Image (tube, coloured by chain):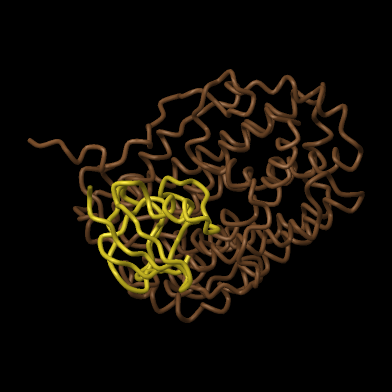
Chain colours: A brown, B yellow
Amino acid sequence: MSYSTFNKNQINPLNEPMFFGNSVNVARYDQQKHSIFEKLIEKQISFFWRPEEVDVSRDRVDFQGLTDSEKHIFISNLKYQTLLDSVQGRSPNIALLPIVSIPELETWIETWSFFETIHSRSYTHILRNLFTDPSDVFEDIVINKEIQKRAEDISRYYDDLIFFTQLWQTHGEGDIEVHGEVHHVSMRELKKKLFLCINSVNALEAIRFYVSFACTFAFAERDLMEGNSKIIRLIARDENLHLVSTQNILNLWQYGKDDPEMKEIAEELRDEALAIFMKAVEQEKEWAHYLFRHGSMIGLNEEILCQYVEYIANMRMEAIGFDAPFKQRSNPLPWMNKYLVSDNVQVAPQEAEISSYLVGQIDSAVSASDLGDFEL
Amino acid sequence: MSKTFKVRVNGQHELTVDPSDGSLLEAMERAGIETRYHCRDGFCGACRTQVKSGDIDYINEPLAIVRPGDCLACCCVPASDLEIDH
């Protein structure tokens, strides 16, 4: 089952499942098994941006004026986001590309990961502006225990899938001994690992970013750290798209619209998938606790942030077929929405609150009904 | 004047909605109903709304996953009288 970079067999990608079918050969997009991924690629590319386009120079002055507890909140969030995007900038490629079987999904995965690397580059852009030498901040990411705890949970499902895929690609199915440990490799087992991995990534994209987003936008509400906020808006818009892709993959499996075996696995591992999501929710609440351990910031505290995590979690869980587990049905941070509206990213550049001028952007203000009077 | 539809929201609000007047989400906002949304562009899914009865039309094709029985309020309009849970 070794991987070939160009599968020489004649295959029809329209009959392939998303994963674990024949590996992709021709990168063609004129026809799609699941057109959603082609649309996501188009949308994501239309969102293209560069961190350097956003002026963050005023943030340095603002940062000096923050209290120590606010500095802790700001920098800790940047560290956590750097961790998340470090993982996301490589893992979808390494874990999913070797097993993907349709060209539109293969290219979506590459596009998705590429944008995560833009996010990582923007954290460097922000930190380089705040500190003459940001090394301490970056170095703490692999030492800080709170971040370590999250890194472990975020990477383990990826690592597990990658390791088993490597065994399968070199040895095929069967019991394989590595360093004295026997691993049972079967297609069913691989697909289970894939299912859990996508659930873990989905939880990451769905909620793990939102505690930091809320803090960032809370600073912006006070006209502080606005350069950073402009960048985070762009990142939030991208992350929403990434989330759509994992939600689509999970739903295609659940509704039996792709690999029928994945439908069985989705039912079999439903409780485990739920546990992955609930653990991510718990970890985000713990993160809020860690952020505010030296004190709150104006407009935000641990309690209200935890309510926001529950509010977001309810929405995200319903999207993948779970019941909303939390009572929090109304938005405890209504001002968050204005930073998450896609169109707000494209207003006049001279206004302080605005994220960026238009770069290859699609004007989504035109709706199909605007063209209703046209006749051919 | 184009045709209007009756939209019942969460079993308690009765709206008269003109589909040419913007999305279902905007109609709910005009009526002062607390709404959920993020992108307002059909790709984040935050405005997911349950359609209990009636039909909707999409004015822009949604990218976010729409499960059976749901709609995305930010990019759809009523196509008949509606009963929805938002």
Q: Residue at 44% of width from left, 47% of height from top? A: A109
Between A118 and A207, the residue placed more toward the observer is A207
- In this rendering, position of residue A172 left or right of residue A193: left
Q: Is residue A194 visible?
A: yes
Say if A143 sits above or below A196 in the image.
Answer: above
A240 up-or-down from A310: above or below: above
The quarter of the picture where the N terminus of chain A appears is bottom left
The answer to whether A353 appears left or right of A304 in the picture is left
Which image quadrant: the C terminus of chain A?
A: top left
Task: Tell me, yes or no, if residue A190 can be seen here.
Answer: no
Tell me the quarter of the picture where residue A265 sits.
Answer: bottom left
Residue A144 percent across, percent down from the top left: 83, 49
Q: Nearer the viewer, residue A337 or A123?
A: A337
Residue shown at the point (67%, 52%) measured from the top left: A333
Q: Quadrant of residue A361?
A: top left
Is residue B66 placed above or below A5 in the rendered structure? below
The answer to whether residue A302 is above or below residue A186 is: above
Frontmost residue, A23 versus A308 = A308
Depth check, front residue: B39 or A182? B39
> Residue visible at 52% across and 42% down?
A341
